[in-house]
Image (tube, grey):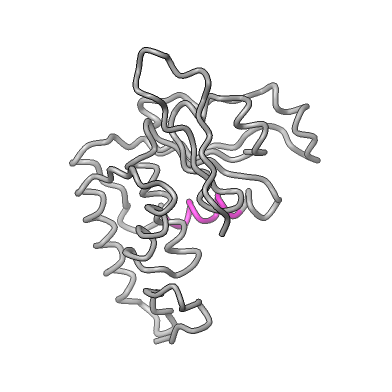
Amino acid sequence: MCRPLVINSPRYPTNCKPPLGAVRLSDGFYLGDVYASKDPSFIFMNKITHIINCAGKEIENEEHTHMRENFGLAGFTGIKFLTFYWLDDDRQLIFDEEDRVPVEIVKFVDEALDQGTSVLVHSMRGQSRATVVSILYFMESFQWDLLKTLEFINSRRPDLEIRANFLQQLQTYTKRKLMPKTKKRYQRSEEWTETILDLPMY
């Protein structure tokens, strides 16, 4: 994993609190706020071709159509979006009954990373809803447990403000995944000295 890189949007109003911008959690994976999603320089410099908008009811997707020619990527026709219409509210449900949300997230992120480009996950301030998506991706991709994933993301972005309701849903999801329908499932990694290859299957 690389060191976190913080990028602040220069377009943030001067009379408001400083922007959180975006933080690079790993190569090609950025966690950010609304201002990062609207910043063409940030999008272009980091070759972001995929954006996960976790606040679709509050934030319209920015197409950045001028990037089509500038990216210079074969077959690139425009930025792809995965939009969740979640509210930053204690009543908001993140998971569906069939747990399709984590599958959609992993598939979408991996599509960008596999082609050598980047993905931005954002909400309004990037501290709660977007963090949940980031947690889900790292948990599923690296088979980390929830505590280990939180420790990792907090080391990159110490100002997290995840709602208690969202954390509770993540805990419930983790427990549900530990009761597999089939026998061949990995135990989740809890220690930094463990890798997926070290984990037993049951």
Q: Is residue 73 left or right of residue 43?
A: right
- The quadrant in which residue 191 appears is bottom left
For the N terminus, the quadrant is bottom right
Q: Is residue 143 left or right of residue 174?
A: right
As rendered, which of 88 and 160 lies closer to the eye? 160
Q: Which of the two residues, 36 or 184, is positioned nearer the viewer here? A: 36
Instruction: Find out whether residue 80 is within the magenta segment.
Output: no
Q: Please tell me whether residue 109 belongs to the stretch shown in magenta.
A: yes
Total count of labels: 0
Q: Residue at x 20, y 48 (%)?
A: 165
**Quadrant location of the C terminus in the rendered image:** bottom left
Instruction: Give the main secondary structure, helix, strand or loop, of the magenta stretch.
Output: helix
Displayed quadrant of residue 55: top left
Q: Where is residue 67 in the image (x, y as percent from the top left)?
A: 70, 27
Pick the residue in front: 42 or 184.
Answer: 42
Q: Where is residue 193 in the image (x, y as percent from the top left)?
A: 46, 77
Above or below, 114 against 121 in this view is: below
Q: With respect to residue 141, does 123 lie above or below? A: above
Q: Which residue is drawn at the image coordinates 44% and 50% (left, top)?
A: 156
Is residue 131 left or right of 48 when viewed as pictured? left
120 relative position to 48: left or right: left
Indicate the position of residue 102 as horizontal and vertical percent values: 42, 56
Residue in the foreground of this view, choosing between 49 and 127:
127
Residue drawn at 44 percent across, 28 percent down:
34
Task: Tell me the quarter of the picture where residue 145 sits.
Answer: bottom left
**Residue 166 in the image: x percent, y percent?**
26, 49
Q: What stretch is highlighted in magenta?
A: 102-110
